[in-house]
Amino acid sequence: MTTSSRGFAAIQQRDLVNQIADMLTEALLKGDFAPGSHLSEAQLARDFGVSRAPVREAARLLESRGMLVSQPRRGFFVRTFNARELDDVYELRLCLERHAARQLAGTLTADMEAKLQAQLETMRQVARGGTAVQQIEEDVAFHRMLCEFSGNQRLVKVYDELCHEMRFCILLIGQLYDDALRVADTHEPIIDALRSRDPAACEAALDYHIGVAQQRVVEMFREREGGEGSSPRKSGEKKKGEEKS
């Protein structure tokens, strides 16, 4: 790290961009910006006390993650999805992970199992004290491991492309379920199914794990599109399902 003539440590531009991106993601998770709303670079720069350049770079980073979209000469907007688009994302994800799990069922090594278990422990740690951004990234990392361990590199490439939209789906699910530790724990049955080396059991575990989330999120969006809105949950009312991603 370099220092200025006055002895101050110079701010690293990349770190600044990532910090702004993380704070914007947190704001999106909390619902501070409604879907489709415009993000003013000038206003955000004033809010963060920085120039517009790092704000713009942070917005581009979130665009690459599927959370924002840019329009020429208009700037950045919070991404919107409809129920059909979300359903399509989940259907493709299920196809990819089902295939990966069936391939992995007969080839799971002790090293692979240990890495999946270690990743699950990391998810539990960030659920206890990490940020929402970290929870999303570690969740994605667990599921990516399934694809990577299948040995099909083309499948991994397609999965990586889907991950941008998947992160946004997990963001939406985070608005439905508030027990991050419970969400992390729901990944344990996937590892148990892989240990059984039964391809059908592995596929069933993923169908349940991802399927519950798919049903809840798509249902929520269909209600919104139908003009019914999503009524807030009453105190003490139980949620349907517990899975996140």
Image (cartoon, helix red, strand yellow):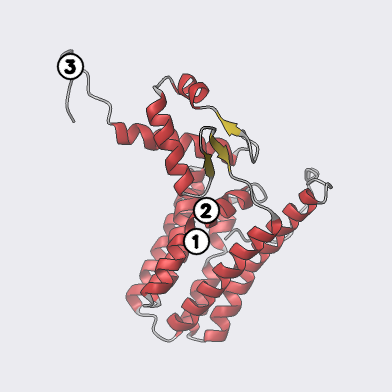
The N terminus, quarter of image: top left
Figure quadrant of the C terminus: bottom right
Q: Which mark is residue 167?
A: 2
Q: Which residue is mark 1?
A: 162
Q: Residue 7 bears which disc, if any? A: 3
Q: Quadrant of residue 148?
A: bottom left
Residue type indicated by callout 2: Arg
Q: Position of residue 31 (x, y in %)?
A: 63, 37
The quadrant holding residue 158 is: bottom left
Residue 21 x %, y %: 44, 37
Q: Amino acid at mark 1?
A: Leu
Give SS at disc 2: helix
Residue 243 location (% of width, % of height): 62, 61
- Classify residue 49 as left or right of residue 181: left
Whether residue 130 can be seen here: no
Query: 129 above or below 217?
Result: above
Question: In front: 224, or 100?
Answer: 224
Residue at 51 percent of width and 73 percent of height: 96
Tell me what residue is drawn at x 47 percent, y 49 percent.
Answer: 65
**Which mark's residue is nearer the viewer, 3 or 2?**
2
